[in-house]
Image (tube, helix red, strand yellow):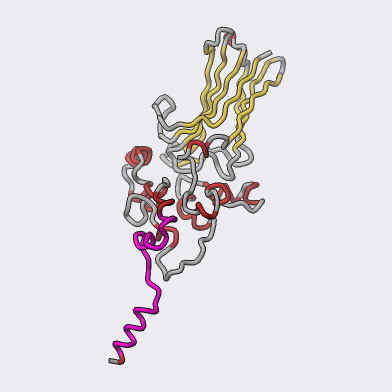
């Protein structure tokens, strides 16, 4: 009888261990918000499926995209499975578990940014307010992406020759693009003649690249620095005007392959003198 009372006391006093489904019973709004995020269905997108197939369906990818074996990230994957109530998450440490995985440097690059030095962290930009704490805005929201970088055009003279400078300046507090290796940012620069026909075109890709030995190399745009593309003689072939466009893409592969979800982040134009 005495042991029965002890066992009953333990059952009713030790906090339970919560899994993802159990969290919804009390945290209804948080669960509703999270279910609408890309993280919650991280293995369902066509982009991931294409990239995963290209990686030979490596199980290492699922350690971040579906740590608990579901179709995406679950509550316990971030909050743990210890006694409830859980401790507040360490930010950006918790995010770094996946967002500094091989082929991503989002958190590492954030820690070296002006944003981090000013005390800003992941939640500053990726959550609207405390009441939306599990809604997690990101690149999959087109409106969130617009204005994530600025594009500027200028011309300088060098040894009697004009040089066009296309300057990309990210406004993100981390590498741009963030996210997985399949994402990329493309700079398109075109020279147009008086009839608005394209005389010449240049393209540059920024994102993760595979090296000659199959290793991933970081060629993303650094926060606060970005990159400059310089092109000699922009007025060649009769060009009188230059247009530039910065495009964010989710699909791996060359720019010629269609990506219906791509977003134009910034545009710039200038007339050549």
Residue 26 shown in magenta:
yes
Q: Residue at x 34, y 57 (%)?
A: 68
Q: Residue at x 55, y 11 (%)?
A: 196
Q: Quadrant of the N terminus?
A: bottom left
Q: Please indicate, yes or no, whether residue 205 appears anywhere in the rendered image.
A: no
Q: Position of residue 179 (x, y in %)?
A: 47, 43
Viewer-proximal residue, 38 or 247?
Answer: 38
Q: Position of residue 89 (x, y in %)?
A: 51, 61
* 160 relative to 251 in the view: left or right: right
Given the current orientation, which residue lies at the most extreme bottom position? 2
Viewer-proximal residue, 49 or 112?
Answer: 49
Q: Position of residue 144 (x, y in %)?
A: 52, 39
Q: Please indicate, yes or no, whether residue 80 appears anywhere in the rendered image.
A: yes
Given the current orientation, which residue lies at the most extreme left position? 1
Work out whether 81 lies above or below 185: below
User: Could you say which quadrant of the image residue 216 lies in?
Assistant: top left
Q: Which residues are magenta?
A: 3-31
Q: Quadrant of the C terminus?
A: top right
Q: Position of residue 43 (x, y in %)?
A: 35, 46
Q: Residue at x 52, y 18 (%)?
A: 201
- The majority secondary structure of the magenta stretch comes to helix
User: Could you say which quadrant of the image residue 54 lies in?
Assistant: top left
Residue 269 shown in magenta:
no
């Amino acid at each position: 009888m005495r042991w029965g009372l002890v066992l009953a006391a333990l059952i009713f006093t030790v906090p339970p261990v919560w899994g993802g489904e159990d969290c919804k019973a009390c945290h209804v709004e948080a669960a509703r918000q999270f279910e609408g995020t890309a993280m919650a269905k991280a293995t369902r997108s066509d982009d991931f499926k294409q990239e995963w197939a290209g990686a030979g369906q490596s199980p290492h990818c699922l350690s971040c995209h579906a740590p608990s074996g579901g179709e995406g990230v679950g509550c316990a994957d971030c909050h743990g499975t210890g006694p409830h109530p859980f401790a507040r998450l360490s930010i950006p440490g918790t995010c770094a578990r996946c967002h500094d995985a091989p082929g991503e440097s989002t958190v590492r690059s954030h820690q070296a940014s002006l944003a981090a030095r000013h005390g800003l962290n992941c939640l500053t930009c990726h959550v609207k307010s405390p009441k939306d704490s599990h809604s997690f805005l990101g690149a999959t929201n087109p409106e969130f992406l617009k204005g994530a970088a600025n594009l500027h055009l200028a011309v300088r003279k060098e040894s009697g020759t004009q040089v066009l400078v296309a300057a990309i300046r990210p406004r993100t507090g981390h590498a741009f693009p963030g996210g997985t290796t399949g994402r990329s940012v493309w700079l398109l620069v075109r020279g147009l003649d008086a009839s608005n026909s394209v005389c010449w075109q240049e393209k540059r890709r920024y994102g993760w690249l595979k090296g000659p030995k199959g290793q991933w190399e970081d060629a993303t745009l650094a926060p606060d620095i970005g990159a400059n593309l310089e092109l000699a003689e922009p007025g060649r072939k009769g060009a009188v005007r230059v247009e530039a466009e910065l495009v964010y893409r989710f699909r791996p592969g060359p720019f010629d392959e269609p990506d219906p979800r791509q977003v134009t982040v910034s545009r710039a134009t200038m007339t050549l003198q």
